[in-house]
Amino acid sequence: MQQNHHQNLVGFIWNIANKLRGPYRPPQYRRVMLPMIVLRRFDLVLAENQKKVLAEKERLEARGITGPALEKALSRIATSGRKQELFNTSGFTFDKLLADPPNIAGNMIAYIQGFSPRARDIFDKFDFEAEIAKLDEANRLFLILKEFCSNEIDLSPKTLSNLQMGYLFEELVRKFNEQANEEAGDHFTPREVIRLMVQLLFTDEEGIFAPGIYRSIYDPTAGTGGMLSEAEKYICGDGTHEGLNPDAHIELFGQEYNPESYAICCSDLLIKDEPIDNLIYGDTLGVKDAKNKNNGFVPHDGHQEKKFHYMLSNPPFGVEWKPEEDFVREEYDDQGFSGRFGAGLPRINDGSLLFLQHMISKMHNPPKLVDGLPLDNNSEGGDGSKIAVVFNGSPLFTGDAGSGESNIRRWIIENDLLDAIVALPDQMFYNTGIYTYVWIVSNRKPEHRRGKVQLIDGTRHYKKMDKSLGNKRNELAEDHIRELVRLYAEHQHEATSIAPVHTKGSSKPTGTENRTVSKIFDNHEFGYLKITVERPLRLNFQANPQRVARLDEQRAFANLATSKKRKDQAAYQAEIEAGKQTQIAIKELLEELDGNILYQNRGEFEAVLNKALKKADLKVGAPVKKAILAALSERDPEADICRDKKGNPEPDPELRDTENVVLPADISLPLPLKYDNETGHDKLLALVKDYCEAYLAAEVLPHVPDAWIDHSKTKVGYEIPLNRHFYVYEPPRPLEEITGEISQLEKEIVAMLAEVV
């Protein structure tokens, strides 16, 4: 299709959309325009053989043929050369609808109901009948249909091939979604970000060039299908640009829970005459006890037991997974690593890492290696898989050592699945201005990438848009995409790139700078040991009036004057009264002690206290005795260390601290500690205890000589501090320069005030 013809069609359809103004706001135009475009295309595709379809339907039904057999027979007659089922038995066309204006709404609904099941399902998901009623009430339905029948817009297969029509539809989806930018971020990824992800995904994938190669591509959050479509286009071409391998056989799979997005994706595939059975309407993570629905909603993974060669996804940013929690937790508890979420569960307010674990569970087995080289595909090894997923910053570092997020990162990195992360500029998405990151995950890394993770800083590779779209003010040009892909492909540590410098407030770059933008790290460099450093508890004790009064604040002491015998009122009151008498006796006993003596050894004071209790023939339980000691004590750095019955120092919770210590460089991965943070803990300590003690001696004891490590509390954590690795210190401007600017501003203000006066 020539570019000018393509743009003319886009422009004309855009003008039709503007006729909806009034009943619809511009962000709502797509509710009408997208299903109308699909409907008009189907109308023109089926126009030639409509009478034959109706005649064949009458003949076959007279013979008692119904159901799938009838549908397949009608589909064969409806169109020639189409692979996917499409027909209409209503007898209506756009021309016939226009010929009966008073009944146009009812006839149009009957027309839609006459389509083949999958096409009819698309309009159900669009909820188009509701829009038809709204258009008819606003006197816009006849007008819009008439515009689509204009000679200026020809969507017939004689003018546009299925592939060309598909790309026209994609372009219109993109424009309508951009217009609805306040909600588009949930299901629409900027096309240039998708192109970057796709090119990163297929870099170094030599197998994709094999003649007739079969490869499957999957998106668990398919949205409107942009990622699937762009990946297919990049491999097979689009009729204008040749793909990597036009002879490749590509099969697309996806799942989407938003009905409108699902309808758009199905429309795109059906327009291009591609299978839509592989696209599932449902919740990928799963919903437990979902209400029965008659619209085909699948409340779980719709591709269970399937594996895929390539996967792409843009999971929702920072969206809680509360609706899926029961289903996910049950799978986690019951199946562990036999299910999808064995490594752990992230916090409830962001389910991004759940989708990554889900995709990893869909990977083909990795190729088996002999002397570092993959065996052929006929061996017991598999094809392996590769994933590109875009996240916000949370999955990089959220979660302390031992948390769900940290464990997921640990599992991915220790199993050598994380290949690279590319940091993108901010203000790239329509509904958020945050920084985003493309993760490349693979279980078939080439030899030079094994055991390594590449970090790429692409935050300065962008250009300002001429006109912002919501929060989207920046975009990737083709030069930026090529540069980021080059950096990934060359896989060089400390690689530099010339990036534009954008001064705040300037719409265009004010210069360039050569910066280090690529770094290579060993897997273990992202891991750390969180050690707990204890210091001894030191207390003094004194039975002065102020400390004795603090006894009332101690729960165990206050509970003496309570009772659980609520059914027997007499016993209830008697127990409370006895408790009060015990409280009085304890206080009187303490008041008899010499309040001027300060004890700096707990053992000495306990001996005095025990002697007094015995003399008064007063027996108190361990909780009450502990309350007495707590009330009469204060922290004292000069006091003796408090020790347990074995003579070991007791730790002071208020002086407790933690230190994050990088993993030893010579440690083997994966670590023996399991993801419950308990199993294998003794094996972990055997590897790192001396290393941690050496750290304590070098970094802690010179400052606090009485500190020690409680090794039973040692945890393993993983984080990816990408920004820290690329931070470049910029010294503040000279004070004289700042002072000069302030003086100049003061002069300008004085001059302006003089003009006003």
Image: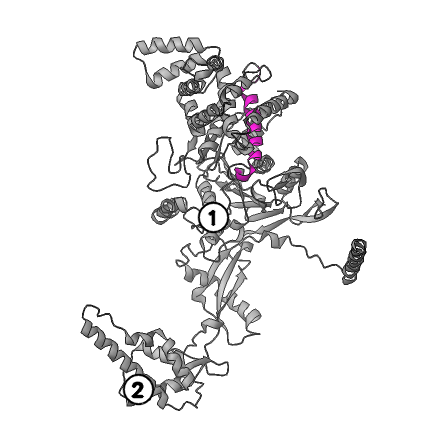
Crowd rating for badge 2 (residues with CA inside 10 Å; few <14, some 14–19, many 20+): some
Looking at the picture, how far across and down is residue 278, in whole percent? 43, 29
Q: Which residues are magenta?
A: 159-183
Looking at the picture, how far across and down is residue 645, in whole percent? 36, 78
Crowd rating for badge 1 (residues with CA inside 10 Å; few <14, some 14–19, many 20+): some
Check residue 350 in the rendering and tell me which mark sits there, or answer none. 1
Foreground residue among 712 and 464: 464
Q: Amino acid at mark 2?
A: Leu
- The secondary structure type at the circle numbered 1 is loop
The magenta stretch spans residue 167: yes
Foreground residue among 152 and 500: 152
Which comes sooner in the sequence, label 1 or label 2? 1
Looking at the picture, how far across and down is residue 540, in whole percent? 45, 83
Q: Tell me the chief SS of the magenta region.
A: helix
Residue at (37% x, 37% y) in the render = 299
Looking at the picture, how far across and down is residue 629, in whole percent? 38, 80
Looking at the rendered image, the quarter that the C terminus falls into is: bottom right
Distance from the alpha carbon under mark 1 to that under mark 2: 57 Å
Color scheme of the displayed model: one colour
- Which residue is label 2 attached to? 613
The answer to whether 704 is drawn above or below residue 254 in the figure is below
Looking at the rendered image, the quarter that the N terminus falls into is: top right
Q: Amino acid at mark 1?
A: Asp
Foreground residue among 90 and 480: 90
The magenta stretch spans residue 124: no
Residue 276 in view (yes/no): no
